[in-house]
């Protein structure tokens, strides 16, 4: 697996995520919990982390596509799903009364909610 280059802080976060994922996988194996290894790999997919970061930094999709191995539709879906997740995390932070975390999730969601990824339809009526 080729992992794209990330800024150092983001690279450390990706490494921590993958390490926690490995620990969970080992715990599941140790306790003989039923698991589908393909599904387990799918739910911890960090392949589009750098792409999402570039999008959040304001880069245009055409520019991102120049060095991406992914199709446009996959990138747009990933961005939309990330925004949905951030909104849900924002709601959870609000329910927990954590105003600063709620603000962080809201700001992150606002950064990626732009342009072609959130156009209702690409077809003109």
Image (cartoon, helix red, strand yellow):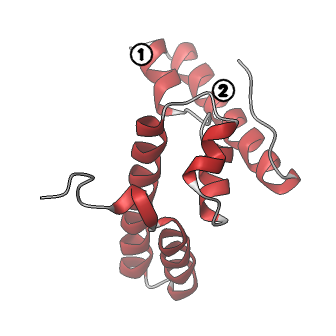
Q: Which is more toward the observer, 93 or 9?
A: 9
Would residue 94 be found to the left or right of residue 122 on screen?
right
Would residue 73 be found to the left or right of residue 55 on screen?
left
Q: Pinpoint residue 24: horizontal percent, then vertical percent.
A: 58, 30
User: Badge 1: how crowded within 10 Å, few (<14), some, or many (20+)?
Assistant: few
For the C terminus, the image quarter is bottom left
Q: In this view, does 102 lie above or below 5?
A: below
Q: In this view, does 36 lie above or below 70?
A: above
**Regarding mark 1 in the picture, which secondary structure is present there?**
loop
- For label 1, the residue is 35
User: At x 57% / y 77%, what residue is drawn?
Assistant: 104
- For label 2, the residue is 22
As drawn, which residue projects farthest toward the left? Answer: 125
Question: In the picture, residue 80 is in which quadrant?
Answer: bottom left
Q: Which mark is residue 102?
A: none
Q: Pinpoint residue 37: horizontal percent, then vertical percent.
A: 48, 13
Q: Pinpoint residue 1: horizontal percent, then vertical percent.
A: 70, 17
Q: In this view, does 27 lie above or below 74?
A: above
Q: How many labels does the image show?
A: 2
As drawn, which residue projects farthest toward the right? Answer: 8
User: Badge 2: how crowded within 10 Å, few (<14), some, or many (20+)?
Assistant: some
**Regarding mark 2 in the picture, which secondary structure is present there?**
helix
Q: Pinpoint residue 91: horizontal percent, then vertical percent.
A: 36, 73
User: At x 43% / y 73%, what residue is drawn?
Assistant: 90
């Amino acid at each position: 697996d080729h992992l794209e280059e990330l800024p150092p802080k983001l690279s450390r976060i990706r490494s921590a995520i993958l390490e926690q994922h490995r620990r969970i996988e080992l715990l599941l194996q140790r306790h003989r919990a039923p698991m589908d290894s393909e599904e387990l790999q799918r739910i911890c997919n960090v392949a589009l982390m750098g792409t999402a970061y570039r999008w959040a930094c304001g880069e245009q999709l055409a520019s991102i596509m120049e060095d991406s191995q992914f199709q446009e539709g996959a990138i747009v879906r990933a961005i939309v799903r990330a925004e949905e997740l951030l909104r849900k995390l924002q709601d959870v932070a609000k329910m927990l009364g954590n105003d600063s975390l709620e603000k962080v999730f809201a700001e992150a969601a606002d950064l990626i909610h732009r342009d072609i990824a959130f156009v209702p339809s690409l077809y003109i009526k």
